Amino acid sequence: MKVNEFASCLAASRLYGDKETEITGLQADSRRVKPGDLFICLPGFTVDGHDFAPQAAANGASALVCERKLDLDLPQIVVDDCRFAMAVLSNAFFGSPSSRMRMIGVTGTNGKTTTTYLIERIMQDQNIKTGLIGTIQLRYDGQTFPASGTTQESLELQRTLSDMAQKGVQCCVMEVSSHALQQGRVKGTDYRTAIFTNLTQDHLDYHHTMEEYRAAKGLFFSRLGNVISPWKEERKYAVLNADDEASAYFAAQTAAEVITYGIDSPANVRASQISITSKGTFFHVDTFKGEADISLRMVGKFNVYNALAAITAALLEDVPLLEIKASLESVAGVSGRVESVDEGQDFAVIVDYAHTPDGLENVLRAVCEFAAGRVLTVFGCGGDRDTTKRPLMGKIAAKYSDHVFVTSDNPRTEDPQLILRDIEAGLQEDEVAQDRYDMIVDRREAIRKAIEMASPSDVVLIAGKGHETYQLIGGVVHDFDDRVVAKEVIRGRSY
Ligand SMILES: CC(=O)N[C@H]1[C@@H](OP(=O)(O)OP(=O)(O)OC[C@H]2O[C@@H](n3ccc(=O)[nH]c3=O)[C@H](O)[C@@H]2O)O[C@H](CO)[C@@H](O)[C@@H]1O[C@H](C)C(=O)N[C@@H](C)C(=O)N[C@H](CCC(=O)O)C(=O)O
Ligand SMILES: Nc1ncnc2c1ncn2[C@@H]1O[C@H](COP(=O)(O)OP(=O)(O)OP(=O)(O)O)[C@@H](O)[C@H]1O
Ligand SMILES: N[C@H](CCC[C@H](N)C(=O)O)C(=O)O
Ligand SMILES: [Mg+2]
């Protein structure tokens, strides 16, 4: 593509320099620029990509996309917002790959990864070649790739979608974070179905207020159906959780057809007769395409919501309900989500990714429902993230646990001790919590103490890191996997 063809994708852009310059690739990191690349200067949150334009030029960039004209002898496309431009240009460069697949996106504070995994299983079982993009990994065409976050930057996303389309992927199910929506990472991506799981507190460091956070998620629904593509005539669906009050706000914003799922409120797909054991969850589901009884191998009422969202999306893809049931019942669980660590010990150890107040409350409620003995909780809160969730999580941990071990969870650049103190403030709101908690900065030590305290029938819940295999302390990434550490400690414990 020539530089003027890129410029013409952006109505209000200004092009300076040789319009015929040929572009062979896109890049937003000067260190990775190859000759022929169009370098996009992203004004980042930590550094300004414009400052790296000379390095990009030295590495052979053919042209620049920037927010102000730079003093460099290269063609330049000047735009108002480079991040949004990057999404539009990436989509154009890769030939709108999302329009060649069935795109199903999932947004919401909790449950995105789980819901995408369930949908992936259902679609794969229909012999529909399905790709997955999310927090744990990317996978398609028999290959897996590490994820760098929940939703890729637009350039990486369009590259991934293009590769999927070339490899014959017919359906892509992906997580869409509020950060991605706010930053326009998915702009131009043509979703057929947009799913909302729930909205509860998280990320207030980034979104500042719950209203702003909700508004970011709202972008997913307000943009749905506004993308020009070969699927244009096709129906678009907003799949909303009838039990979450934010759904009415999203419904009012979307031009797509609204389909609801829920438990407590009337919904198009509704679960009843829920019963939860330590082995799984049973429920009856009433849908617009029949009824079924479903026995999930995953525990917790929250997983009924995730299953309902998956059922709704699959019904909209015309998958028969009984085949959806068979697929859901075959899912043993999702890595790091209510995952049991079983070394033959006489108490339960569960590793879970709950890292928000609502996530923690949900998993603790589920654990309390089936725990025959005490509930011993190990958890912490991430550094350089929403600080206001820390005391809330402390209070919740105290409310549902017999003993709490407050510890580190990726302190990043913060002082770990201070994060623990923020959590402690919430624990101390609980009058009976005073002598029922320990503060242990070293997570391995905290896990060891909890497991040593466990008696037969107790449940040790280790929350916050789930599938993660690292602990970020300062700028250093240390190997750390709750499941591995728990196993080592259990094996070392004498009975
Ligand atoms: C707040 C946020 O979203 N930050 C993202 C952002 O970082 P940034 O703007 O600070 O980047 P920067 O370091 O200032 O660099 C600016 C530009 O200069 C370029 N650069 C930089 C150095 C250099 O030598 N040359 C060069 O060209 C960079 O490539 C970049 O294009 O752009 C980076 C690269 O594109 C992302 O990796 C980074 O995600 C960081 C790691 C992050 O923590 N993101 C989290 C908050 C996030 O997005 N999370 C959500 C999940 C949330 C959830 O639902 O739980 C997600 O979708 O992953
Ligand atoms: N529907 C739900 N409602 C509330 N909590 C949930 C729900 N589903 C899962 N959880 C809790 O949240 C944790 C994270 O679940 P999951 O990974 O599916 O969410 P996510 O939205 O992908 O998270 P992230 O934003 O970090 O990508 C789980 O380990 C569980 O404790
Ligand atoms: N997507 C979330 C994951 C948090 C996981 C937790 N282990 C932490 O590091 O805070 C975030 O980036 O806020
Ligand atoms: Mg996720």
Image: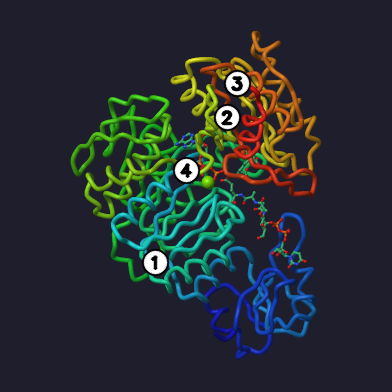
Which amino acid does the dot numbered 3 rest on?
A: Leu
- Closer to the chain start, of discs 4 and 1, is 1
Q: CA distance from mark 1 to mark 2?
A: 36 Å
Q: Are marks 3 and 2 in contact (CB under 8 Å)?
A: no
Q: CA distance from mark 3 to mark 2?
A: 17 Å
Q: CA distance from mark 3 to mark 1?
A: 44 Å
Res. 334 mark: 4
- Callout 1: helix, strand or loop? loop
Res. 376 mark: 3
Which amino acid does the dot numbered 1 rest on?
A: Val
Most distant residue in the top direction: 432
232 or 150: nearer the eye? 150
Q: Is residue 384 left or right of residue 306?
A: right
Q: Nearer the viewer, mark 1 or mark 2?
A: 1
Where's residue 30, x and y in %?
73, 72
Q: Write down the quadrant of residue 277 in the picture.
A: top left
The image's colour scheme reads rainbow
Residue at the image position 28 percent from the left and 57 percent from the top: 126
Q: Residues within 10 Å of mark 1 (few under 14, many from 20)?
A: many
On-image quarter of the C terminus:
top right
Q: Nearer the viewer, mark 3 or mark 2?
A: 3
Vertical relation: 189 (above or below) 425 = below
Q: Can you identify the residue that label 1 sits on? A: 169
Looking at mark 4, is its residue's CB closer than 8 Å to ligand 2? yes
- Closer to the chain start, of discs 3 and 4, is 4
Q: Can you identify the residue that label 2 sits on? A: 357
